[in-house]
Image (cartoon, rainbow, N blue to C red):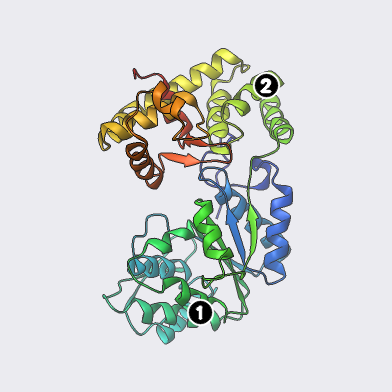
Amino acid sequence: MTTIKPNNPFLIAGYYVPAYFCDREQETEQIINALYNGRNLTLVAPRRMGKTGLIKHAFYKLHEQQSDIITLYLDIYSMQNLNEFVQAFGSTVLGSLDSVPQKAMARISQFIKSCRPVFTLDELSGMPEVSIDIAPEKEMATLKEIFNYLQSSEKRCYIAIDEFQQITEYPEKGVEALLRSYIQSLPNVHFIFAGSKQHVMQEMFLSAKRPFYQSTQTIVIGCINKESYYNFAFSWFKKQHLTLSKDTFSGIYDEFEGHTWYIQALLNRLYGYAENPDQEKVARAIREIVEENEYGYQNLLAAYTSGAIRLVKAIAKERVVPEINAGAFISKYRLKAASSVNTALRTLTKMEMVYRTENGYIVYDRFFAIWLRQQPY
């Protein structure tokens, strides 16, 4: 099977090969070292900081060292309950541990008894793809069977579960403890638990009251080093006979505070212009992206109260708000009483429109923040 080479080296989704991946050498080595030596990992970073790409990059490097390992990735951000989680987990895991289709189907049938797996064959690889439909009240039985299937494998397997903090919101009780009890009995399988809500992930893995307490090595991902990122970007523009100046790149990096996805989105546009990047073209790229998303931004605001809208606009205009209940901030933007501000803030934070950084509250989506600053207050 061949993989089509990207036309644009500044990827904003997916992973290709190491040449298209910038830096993260230390974090990559930490992940590889931990998994190779049998340690599960907790990986924490804000959304769009590049943790998914980092996971897949580490998996790529692991395959270079150990060609016979199995690496699996599952994003559970959209899963709302245990039933949905088990279905997605089963579809990811089942059939992946055997290279011969007949053997895969036989082993799945041997272990999965609580529901009926549906097999289809991938047209390119010829390997079975498995989906399962789980009846209510059968989730825990099926989950146990999936872990038994994993345990029976003779291959070393690494599984990354992204947005792992979502399991804390499932209506079923005891999901954390259930997963922990199964995971600790798998000597041949090791996990990366990745998440974007730092306070929730830290509570899950660092609180003595929680099942996963001190069961993993923790890595917190920050921004890519500015100099390394510039050298990476400069080299790709140079291959197209274009020059990306340090000043132009520095302006992009500083505007988005090193947040990977937003920088990639702009570099992708600038590379596509096939002209030497400058501040004017950066402004053009930002304007294009914001205008393309304007309809979505308008619909997004329509779902919130006037108080929440005023607050998110105020945060956007300030860029960062160290103290949300400060009298000067509330007065400047004619916000209501502190209690009303706190109510609106809880809603905005829960819906991930607002995010708390070390420096204070910001609007999570940086392009959305730019659009909000352009709106009348």
Amino acid type for the residue under numbered disc 2 = Leu
- Determine whether 149 is above or below 131 in the image: below
Q: Which is more N-terminal, label 2 or label 1?
A: 1
Please give left or right for residue 7 compared with residue 35 in the image. left
Amino acid type for the residue under numbered disc 1 = Tyr
Please give left or right for residue 233 compared with residue 344 in the image. right
For the residue pair 218 and 151, the one nearer the viewer reads as 218
Which disc is residue 244 wearing? 2
Residue that appears at 54% across and 37% down: 261
Residue that appears at 70% across and 43% down: 23
Please tell me how crowded label 2 is: few (under 14), some (14-19), or many (20+) other residues with Cα within 10 Å.
many
Measured as percent of width and height from the top left, residue 239 is found at 69, 28
- Determine whether 79 is above or below 51 in the image: below
Please give left or right for residue 304 compared with residue 107 in the image. left
Residue that appears at 62% across and 28% down: 253
Q: How many marks?
A: 2
- Determine whether 146 is above or below 371 in the image: below
The Cα atoms of the two marked residues, 1 and 2, are separated by 51 Å
Measured as percent of width and height from the top left, residue 107 is found at 46, 83
Measured as percent of width and height from the top left, residue 354 is found at 43, 39
Which disc is residue 368 wearing? none
Q: Kindly indicate the quadrant of the structure image that contains residue 308.
A: top left
Please tell me how crowded label 1 is: few (under 14), some (14-19), or many (20+) other residues with Cα within 10 Å.
some
Residue located beneath label 1 in the image: 182
From this viewpoint, is residue 377 visible? yes
Marks 1 & 2, CB-CB < 8 Å contact: no
Name of the residue lying farthest toward the top: 280
**The C terminus - image quarter:** top left
Please give left or right for residue 119 compared with residue 189 in the image. left
For the residue pair 142 and 103, the one nearer the viewer reads as 142
For the residue pair 15 and 260, the one nearer the viewer reads as 260
